[in-house]
Amino acid sequence: MKKIICKEKGQMLIEIVVAVGIIALVLLGVSDLMTRSSRVVTFQKQKDEAITIAQKLQNDYRTQRDIDPLGFYANAGNSILEPCISDTYKCTITMDTVTVPNFIQVTIKVEWKDGGQIFSTSLSQSLSKEIK
């Protein structure tokens, strides 16, 4: 067997402590990266769900307009509705008939909380009084 010869006592121990410290720093960086990417994935999932909710509501309003355009236009007026209040998402729908004549500007805003912050996404579409 070979003997390890050290010129100074304790040199091997210092090298081991330094190596363990470097490994700990690398693992800390990797765990931080994984935590941040997990947050990004969660945020993107919530944003996709919010967009899906807004698109569904937009399609519902478009269907109502297609079934009865004159009645839909008469009942819309300038109003703000909150149709989907849940634990996660809050929807606000604004219908504006003043900006463009013979059109209803439907704006759907979906809000959600994540990590103490409020995020939102919105979709807007002009629905005509007459279907062509």
Image (cartoon, rainbow, N blue to C red):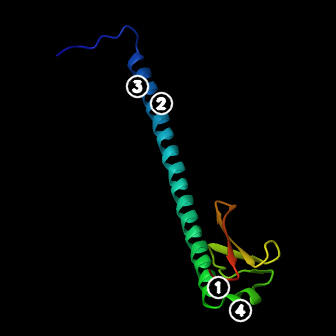
Residue 36 shows up from this direction: yes
In 3D space, how far apart are the residues under numbered discs 4 and 2 (Cα atoms)?
72 Å
Give the total number of marks visible in the rendering: 4
Residue 110 shows up from this direction: no
Query: Which residue type does callout 3 highlight?
Result: Ile
The residue drawn where x is 58% and y is 68% is 51
Tell me if mark 1 has few (under 14), some (14-19) or many (20+) residues whose alpha carbon lies within 10 angstroms of its own: many
Q: Secondary structure at mark 3?
A: helix
Does 7 appear above or below 27?
A: above
Q: Earlier along the polypeptide chain: callout 3 or callout 2?
A: 3
Q: Secondary structure at mark 2?
A: helix
In 3D space, how far apart are the residues under numbered discs 4 and 3 (Cα atoms)?
80 Å
Front of the two marks 4 and 3: 4
Residue 131 percent across, percent down from the top left: 63, 82
In 3D space, how far apart are the residues under numbered discs 1 and 3 (Cα atoms)?
73 Å
Tell me if mark 4 has few (under 14), some (14-19) or many (20+) residues whose alpha carbon lies within 10 angstroms of its own: few
Pick the quarter of the image with the N terminus: top left
Residue sitting farthest toward the front: 132
Residue 77 located left or right of residue 1: right
In 3D space, how far apart are the residues under numbered discs 4 and 1 (Cα atoms)?
8 Å
In 3D space, how far apart are the residues under numbered discs 1 and 2 (Cα atoms)?
66 Å
- Which residue corresponds to mark 2? 21
Residue 65 image label: 1
Disc 4 + disc 3, Cβ < 8 Å: no
Q: Earlier along the polypeptide chain: callout 4 or callout 3?
A: 3
- Which residue corresponds to mark 3? 16
Residue 57 percent across, percent down from the top left: 61, 78
Q: Secondary structure at mark 4?
A: helix
Pick the quarter of the image with the C terminus: bottom right
The residue drawn where x is 59% and y is 69% is 50
